[in-house]
Amino acid sequence: MTTSQLVQQIKKKKSFLCIGLDVDLNKIPKHLLREDDPIFAFNKAIIDATHHLCVAYKPNTAFYEAYGIKGWQALEKTINYINENHPEIFTIADAKRGDIGNTSTMYAKAFFEDLAFDSVTVAPYMGKDSVEPFLAFNDKHTIMLALTSNEGAFDFQTKQIDGKEVYKHVLETSKSWKNAENLMYVVGATKAEYLADIRNIIPDSFLLVPGVGAQGGNLQDVCKYGMNDNVGLLINSSRGIIYASNNEDFAQMSAHKAEALQKEMALILE
């Protein structure tokens, strides 16, 4: 999917909502555990109930890898279901990969070619040759960790080197990499006050913003400082939507939560 196609969907749906499909078998409704594939059954119900309200889905691969081959098969069925039934929706493999060049190439093939995701999250710590293999794929996007929402972000990301925070060095350096136009960036919603400085460095790039909802991030603040002319934001909510209920009405309740965010986004877009 191209960036312009993503922007068209945002305008059409009046939404820049991304729903995180982070499936924990300890949290899903108990009746689903009787299904042959409870993970996929849960995801399918959530997707069927919310696809008209969001522009992206983001499975965190850890929640599938934890269940071995059955978890990976559920991930494959989930991405196939989205691509076959809702090809207009942007898909994100939240895998946070990052390794030397030939390994990164194989990771990229796994997510872009085999599973056919539109994008994958990567960690930039190993530098250019660990990220550029992902950027080499046409109409695919590499979403690089920039400033995350966890407490440990302050251990390294905000430390100063030569009078400038590390995350700013990362952002500025990444702009020089080959096919950098395929980059997007992760910026946590709990770091909204940093977004103005981030936009000074990467004014046109899309930002994937987790942390709205369960982690306490504020949508209005994120939009105030982070929105650009093409919106430029994908606001992710995971637990706050998919675990809105653990009863048989779970999909309906997830849709109510997603709709509340979508309506708030529609007002902002106006």
Image (spheres, rainbow, N blue to C red):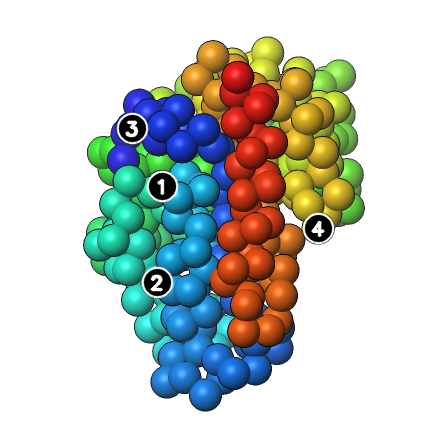
Amino acid at circle 2: Thr
Q: Residue at x 50, y 62 (%)?
A: 251
Label 4 or label 2, whichever comes before in sequence order: 2
Q: What is the C-alpha distance between the residues marked 1 and 2?
A: 13 Å
Q: Which mark is residue 172?
A: none
User: SS for tag 1?
Assistant: strand
Asked if marks 3 and 1 touch (Cβ < 8 Å), the reply is no
Q: Amino acid at mark 4?
A: Ala
Q: Disc 4 versus disc 3: distance between alpha carbons?
A: 29 Å
Please give the residue where the numbered disc 1 appears in the rendered image.
90
Q: In the rendered image, which residue does mark 4 sit on?
A: 214
**How far is disc 3 from disc 2 in space, using C-alphas?**
22 Å
Q: Secondary structure at mark 4?
A: loop
As helix, strand or loop, the secondary structure at mark 2 comes to helix
Identify residue type, mark 3: Gln
Viewer-closest of 174 and 259? 259
Quickly name the residue at label 2: 78
Q: Which mark is residue 5?
A: 3
Side of 23 where 134 appears, left or right: left
- 55 vs 270, nearest the viewer: 270
